[in-house]
Amino acid sequence: MNLSQNLDVTYFIPRRPGFAYPIADDFYLCGRWKNLTSLTLNNLRCTPEGLPNLAIFLSEHENLEVLRFRSTGASTEALALPRNTLPRLKELESDREFANAILTCNTDISRPLETLKGIDLSGSESDPTFFENLTRIGDKISRVELASWGEMKDLHKLLGCVPRLTWLNIGNHGSSGRPEHGYGGVRTVSTVSYYVFRDVKILK
């Protein structure tokens, strides 16, 4: 691994009592790798007090092109990112709340974001912000890999937001596709992938 450009920090919690996800507030406060182009952060816990640290951490890594982020602890729904955070981002893998935080953060030059992964569409009717964000930037998205989905109409709504989509992995039907012991491959779920064309028909 070339640490100057790629960093993967993934915590796998032991299947024994007494272990907890590590708190990453200080990591976000102090960690700086200006040349990073690919970053994976899985199963690190962020407290509500640490969300400003996370926001600054992301804004300081402006060369990131690939970001895979799965956090426990505080909801990232309240994450407020400075303008021009992650201006070069091409691929994002995260939950829906974190994706919203990224997509609602404006940049002076439009992000070259082409790929979204790990999104859970289950219960998305209560989160119209995601579809609004997707509609705003959807003409750049060519690949989507869902973690899960609940209603067929959500898939149709998704396709309506991304007119240039060429690949769709619909993930797990009915519940979150994230493993029960955290994101990282503990439990495998079945997925179905499609090449997507404008006359696509989604079958139950």
Image (cartoon, rainbow, N blue to C red):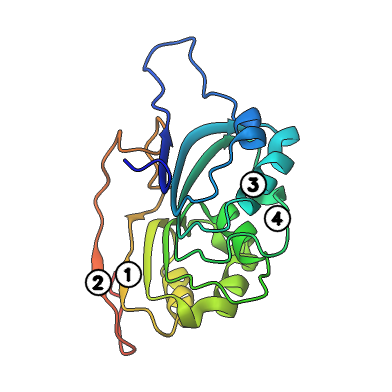
**Can you tell which quarter of the image residue 54 is in?**
top right
Disc 4 and disc 2: Cα gap in Å?
A: 34 Å
Which badge, 3 or 2, is on the more N-terminal residue?
Answer: 3
Helix, strand or loop under label 3: helix
Rendered location of residue 7, percent (x, y): 42, 41
Checking the image for residue 96, the label placed there is none
* Residue bearing the label numbered 1: 168
Between disc 4 and disc 3, the foreground one is 4
Helix, strand or loop under label 4: loop
96 lies above or below 24: below
* Residue bearing the label numbered 2: 194
Helix, strand or loop under label 1: strand
Disc 4 and disc 3: Cα gap in Å?
A: 11 Å
Rendered location of residue 82, percent (x, y): 73, 57
Q: What residue type is labelled 2?
A: Tyr
Q: Which amino acid does label 3 sit on?
A: Thr
- The residue under the point 38% across, 47% down is 177
* Residue bearing the label numbered 3: 76
Q: Do the residues labelled 2 and 1 touch (CB within 8 Å)?
A: yes
Q: In this view, does 15 lie to the left or right of 109?
A: left
| Number of residues whose C-alpha sits closer than 10 Å to that of mark 3, classed few (under 14), some (14–19) or many (20 or more) | many
* Residue bearing the label numbered 4: 81
Residue found farthest to the bottom: 199
